[in-house]
Image (tube, helix red, strand yellow):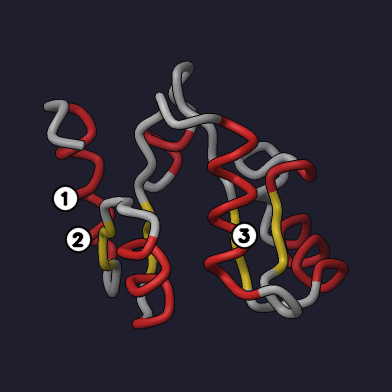
Amino acid sequence: SLFSFVHRSNCVNVLVTTTQLVPALAKVLLYGLGGVFPIENIYSATKIGKESCFERINSRYGRKCTYVVVGDGRDEETAAKQMNFPFWRVSSHSDLAALHHALDVGHL
């Protein structure tokens, strides 16, 4: 399940969305994901774009971190490549299971 890898003690979950911030926060709360994505880790790319959000996240956490962009779209993949972050395409639950395995074996 998604929650088996998002609560790792040495990881931080950050949500970057093209939804405006207030509706994005509402969706996170409605779906019960407030514990997975703390409010300070939710970024809206509506006005500034995903690349700018990734740059802000990079400056916040530093270059010594390992970043993995998880998404289903071309814009996430493009933004990840511009930042030299690995990109993990997710289109089904099995993709999340594969990501969980990759994290467990230290592939990412």
Q: Is residue 4 left or right of residue 11?
A: left
SS for callout 3: helix
SS for callout 1: helix
SS for callout 2: helix
83 or 21, nearer to the observer? 83
Distance from Cα at disc 3 to Cα at disc 1: 26 Å
Name the residue beneath numbered marker 1: 98
Among the two numbered marks 3 and 1 on one chain, the one whose residue lies closer to the N terminus = 3
Identify the amino acid type marked 2.
Ser
Name the residue beneath numbered marker 2: 94
Identify the amino acid type marked 1.
Ala
Distance from Cα at disc 3 to Cα at disc 2: 27 Å
Name which residue lies at 64% across and 49% down. Answer: 56
Report if the CB atoms under discs 3 and 2 are less than 8 Å apart: no
Neighbor class of circle 1 (other Cα within 10 Å; few <14, some 14-19, many 20+) is few
Report if the CB atoms under discs 1 and 2 are less than 8 Å apart: yes
Q: Position of residue 38 (x, y in %)?
A: 72, 40
Distance from Cα at disc 1 to Cα at disc 2: 6 Å
Among the two numbered marks 3 and 2 on one chain, the one whose residue lies closer to the N terminus = 3
Name the residue beneath numbered marker 3: 53
Name which residue lies at 44% across and 31% down. Answer: 63
Q: Position of residue 28 (x, y in %)?
A: 71, 58
